[in-house]
């Protein structure tokens, strides 16, 4: 069965620092993988997706993610975090969009 | 245009009321979804419509009744809800069943 694990419930970074949010998946074949961001009380916005091909995927708002089959991971990165990046981040897998538990990002000034 | 709209934004209803949530997309997507999201939790899939036919019902209680009148509209009819049904209800759509989904802003439902 498809499943996603986000090991970090809450991460705090300083503004301008780099960011990496972890995502591990369990899936029988090459998965479809997604990262979404959600601000409080809002819907989810797609940051990026991986279906096949180049394992380094560029997304919106300066985010990127790398698919590593050997580690069953799809970690999200950003080189320099802005205060507006504070939100909940969800990794998801598969056509029926099974979500991880989410990682809440706090940005310190 | 990647917009999914949902109405109303907020809804307060008593346990004996009947109400409906509405969702609309004009991207030509043929799959539409309802999710329920409790505070500090990920969205939980409730229903999937594919080509206007219900293809997945994730064991949702019958007090929630989905309807897909056409390829652009998705409704969720609510009746005799319980306080624990209070949540953010999200609608999403995708081109096909395995593509990325685009989410609406949600309806914040409070059951009193």
Image (spheres, coloured by chain):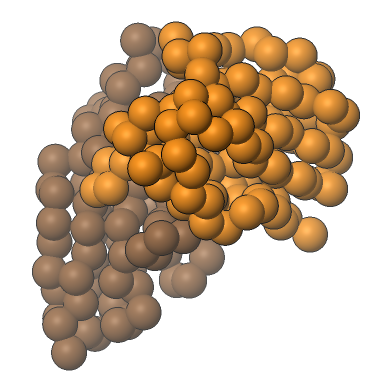
Chain colours: A brown, B orange
Please provide percent x and percent y for residue A81: 29, 77
Q: Residue at x 35, y 10 (%)?
A: A1
Q: Is residue A26 left or right of residue B110?
A: left
Q: Residue at x 36, y 79 (%)?
A: A84
* Viewer-nearest residue: B98 or A57: B98
Q: Is residue A42 left or right of residue A15?
A: right
Residue most toward the front? B16
Rendered image quadrant of residue B96? top right
Q: Is residue B50 visible?
A: yes
Q: Residue at x 83, y 38 (%)?
A: B72
Please provide percent x and percent y for residue B88: 43, 46
* Viewer-nearest residue: A5 or A44: A44
Q: Is residue A73 visible?
A: no
Q: Is residue B76 above or below residue A26?
A: below
Q: Residue at x 34, y 73 (%)?
A: A85
Q: Is residue A85 left or right of residue A33?
A: left
Q: Is residue A30 above or below residue A87?
A: above
């Amino acid at each position: 069965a498809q499943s996603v694990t986000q090991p970090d419930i809450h991460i705090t970074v300083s503004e301008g620092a780099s960011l990496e949010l972890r995502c591990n998946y369990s899936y029988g074949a090459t998965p479809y993988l997604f990262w979404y961001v959600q601000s409080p009380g809002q819907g989810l916005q797609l940051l990026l997706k991986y279906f096949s091909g180049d394992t380094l995927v560029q997304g919106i708002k300066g985010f990127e993610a790398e698919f590593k089959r050997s580690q069953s991971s799809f970690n999200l990165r950003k080189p320099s975090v802005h205060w507006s990046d504070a939100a909940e981040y969800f990794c998801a897998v598969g056509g029926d969009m099974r979500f991880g538990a989410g990682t809440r990002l706090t940005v310190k000034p | 245009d990647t917009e999914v709209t949902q109405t109303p934004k907020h809804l307060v209803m008593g346990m004996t009321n009947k109400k409906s949530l509405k969702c609309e997309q004009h991207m030509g997507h043929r799959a539409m979804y309802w999710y329920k999201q409790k505070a500090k939790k990920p969205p939980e899939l409730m229903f999937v419509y594919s080509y206007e036919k219900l293809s997945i019902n994730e064991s949702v209680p019958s007090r929630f009744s989905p309807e897909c009148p056409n390829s652009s509209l998705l409704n969720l009819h609510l009746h005799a809800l319980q306080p624990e049904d209070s949540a953010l209800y999200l609608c999403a759509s995708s081109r096909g069943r395995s593509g990325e989904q685009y989410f609406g802003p949600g309806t914040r439902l409070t059951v009193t």
